[in-house]
Image (tube, rainbow, N blue to C red):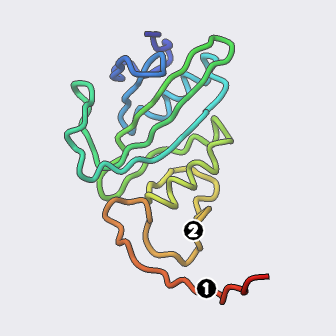
Amino acid sequence: MISLSAAAPTDVITSEAMATDVACFPTTSQYFKLVESFKNDGFEMCVDLCGVDYLEHFERVLPEGVVATRFEVVVNLLSLSKKQRVRIRVQAGNDHAEVDSLFSLYPGTEAMEREAFDFFGILFTGHPELTRILMPEDWEGHPLRKDYGIGKVPVQFKHAPGPR
């Protein structure tokens, strides 16, 4: 397991994790500074950023000291030069999930943060244009939330042509 840089917040909880060199569990206030410390320490790429809704899974396995919330933001960073991977899992909140935007550090997160907002309703403070990216602008709600209604969209089929 790799150690955090000296610039990282001192009391971030870390653990071993599958397919990564270290998993970090910062609070929302530690999140941006922790990612910034990894960026300055040679982690050139933010490979992935996604939202997760744990509506009925508050008992999931987390390291001691991490308080589970309904929504979580998961970030995977990669250092090609060091050949290391880091996973950051921040508990984003329950009803009004919100974390800082990573756009100023990794501009490629712009679309990933918009997708997490669009589908889960997670707000990213400081994002340059936090608008829907895949759903229509007038869509109500966030369709990947576990409590989102299933709904029904009527499908119209054209009459199939006969045999040739």
Q: Quadrant of the C terminus?
A: bottom right
Residue 80 position in % (x across, y down): 67, 17
Which type of secondary structure does the marked residue at label 2 adopt? loop
Residue in the image at 36% along x and 20% along y: 14
In the rendered image, which quarter is residue 144 located in?
Answer: bottom left
Residue 58 against residue 148 in the figure, above or below:
above
Crowding at label 1, few (<14), some or many (≥20) Cα neighbours within 10 Å?
few
On residue 157, the disc is 1
Above or below — where is 103 with respect to 33?
below
User: Residue 101 or 2: which is nearer the viewer?
Assistant: 2
* Residue beneath the point at 65% across and 36% down: 106
Disc 2 residue type (three-letter): Met
Q: Residue furthest bottom?
A: 159
- Residue that sits furthest to the front in the current view: 164
Query: First in sequence: mark 2 or mark 1?
Result: 2
Give the residue number, with chain letter if any, for mark 2: 135
Tell me the quarter of the picture where residue 43 sits: top right
Badge 2: few (under 14), some or many (20 or more) residues near its Cα, within 10 Å?
Answer: some
Which quadrant of the structure image shows residue 151?
Answer: bottom left
Residue at 36% in and 23% down: 12
Q: Amino acid at mark 1?
A: Phe
Percent of width and height locating residue 68: 26, 40
**Looking at the figure, which quarter contains the N terminus?**
top left
Which residue is located at x 60 percent, y 24 percent? 78
Is mark 2 in CB contact (under 8 Å) with mark 1?
no
Give the left or right position of residue 55, taking residue 84 as reference.
left
